[in-house]
Image: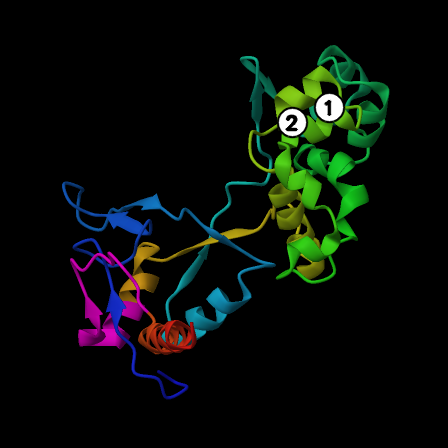
Amino acid sequence: MKRGHEVTVLEASGRTGGHVLTLRDHLADGLYVDAGAEHFTRPGYDLYWEYVKEFNVQVLPYPRRPNVIRFIDGKRYTREMLSDQNILRNLALNQREIDYLTGHQWWEFPLLYFGPYLDNFENEYRPFDAKLNHLDEITVTDLLRKDGASAAAVRFIGESGSALQALWHAAILKLRGVPLWPPQVFRIQGGNQRMTDAFAARLGERVRLGCPVTAIENLERIKKWRLTTSSVAYRW
């Protein structure tokens, strides 16, 4: 709209916001629960922070990540415990992994194996320029095993998703100077849905609810295709 375009938003459901949802029904006055989109971070979310200013929504620090207690096999581990060589050895990690974790936080663990690949990504919008296309055909678990990860490391940080996608995500964060697991997280005062509600209010009647998209046609392309096929048929 700011750039002069006429905009119509087709929303399939009966409400705006998508997975951003703040629940208030059946709760005491003033209480709410964010059922989706739990938080946003800093650094990161640069465009989101711009909209925070534009819509003048109030932000609250969400102190859920400092001093995190992790549960592994039913046992509690503090950050300090997960940098203790004896404890890491008891978790069946190999020596390379133990040495890494004694100097890094647990959430950095994937970077031990992802790190050597990340500088191949020079443009965050062009993952295939990294010439690692073959890694789109294997999982993160496969990559870890290929690169010598212990069975314990595979259990802790392995995934069934594309290895290339995981590396691309980590590379984007590195290019933007954002930690793999940002420790500072925030919420919108009154519920995160206030952000999407602000968008909907600004768009007004341009938002049409209950309008699922069933097909998309490029009319100009169809016209050109018909002209081309007709001329080909005529020449034939």
Residue 215 inside the magenta-drawn segment: yes
Q: Residue at x 78, y 14 (%)?
A: 89
- The answer to whether one can see residue 80 in this image is no
Query: What residue occupies the far bottom of the structure in this picture?
Result: 4
Q: Can you tell which quarter of the image residue 113 is in?
A: top right
Residue 166 to residue 51: above or below: above
Q: In the image, which residues are magenta?
A: 199-217
Please give the name of the residue rendered at 20% of the width and 47% of the height, measured from the top-left corner. 24
Q: Quadrant of residue 127?
A: bottom right
What amino acid type is highlighted by mark number 2? Thr
Q: Which mark is residue 145?
A: 1
Foreground residue among 55 and 61: 55
**Relative to residue 206, is residue 152 depicted above or below?**
above
Q: Label 1 neighbourhood size at 10 Å, few (<14), some (14-19), many (20+)?
A: some
In the displayed structure, 74 sits above or below 82; it is: above
Label 2, on which residue?
Answer: 141
Quadrant location of residue 11?
bottom left
**Number of the label disc, if any, that sits on residue 43:** none
Query: From the viewer's perspective, is residue 214 above or below residue 95?
Result: below
Q: Are the residues at dot 1 and dot 2 in contact (C-beta closer than 8 Å)?
A: yes
Q: Residue furthest front?
A: 236
